[in-house]
Amino acid sequence: TTNALDALVGRVVLRDSATGAVRRTIDQPHPVGHGLAFSPNGMWIAAGPHLFDAATGDRVRTFNTGGAPVNAVAFAPSSNRLYHATGH
């Protein structure tokens, strides 16, 4: 079953799309807002300026946004690039 994302303040919750059951919770240091995406290959989760391993929930990278909030994130169809929009 494919995971669905549910963004809460300071937390990313992965839910089973068929049952709604919580599969994993990833704590965030900051609210996610609109900057949340699952990579097309299912390997990565982008939440704000952070990149997580979808299988483990481990944070693998934090991008420097110069302190600006991340308003949107999107993966390339190949999953090998992550785009983000920032602004106040």
Image (cartoon, rainbow, N blue to C red):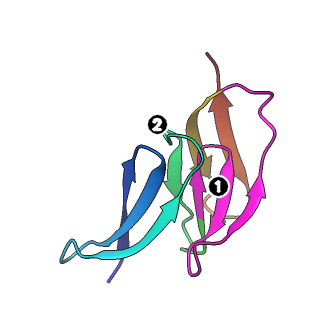
The amino acid on which the numbered mark 1 sits, given as a three-letter code, is: Ala
Quadrant of residue 57 in the image?
bottom right
Q: Residues within 10 Å of mark 1 (few under 14, many from 20)?
A: few
Q: Of 51 and 10, which appears nearest the observer?
A: 10
Residue that label 2 marks: 33
Describe residue 2's horizontal placement relative to residue 12 as left or right: left
Q: For the point 64% across and 55% down, which residue is it?
A: 76
Mark 1 element type: loop
Q: Is residue 82 above or below residue 34?
A: below
Mark 2 element type: loop
Q: Quadrant of the N terminus?
A: bottom left
Q: Is residue 65 above or below residue 4?
A: above
* Residue 73 rendering spot, x and y as whole percentages: 58, 43
For the magenta stretch, what is the residue range? 45-68
Q: For the point 63% across and 28% down, which residue is it?
A: 69
Q: Residues within 10 Å of mark 2 (few under 14, many from 20)?
A: some
Residue that label 1 marks: 76
Q: Is residue 70 magenta?
A: no
Number of on-image labels: 2
- Give the label, 2 or 1, closer to the camera: 2
Q: Is residue 64 magenta?
A: yes
* Residue 43 rendering spot, x and y as whole percentages: 60, 75
Q: Is there a contact, CB below 8 Å, between mark 2 and mark 1?
A: no
Q: For the point 39% across and 50% down, which residue is it?
A: 7
The amino acid on which the numbered mark 2 sits, given as a three-letter code, is: Gly
* Residue 75 rendering spot, x and y as whole percentages: 62, 54
Farthest top residue in view: 88
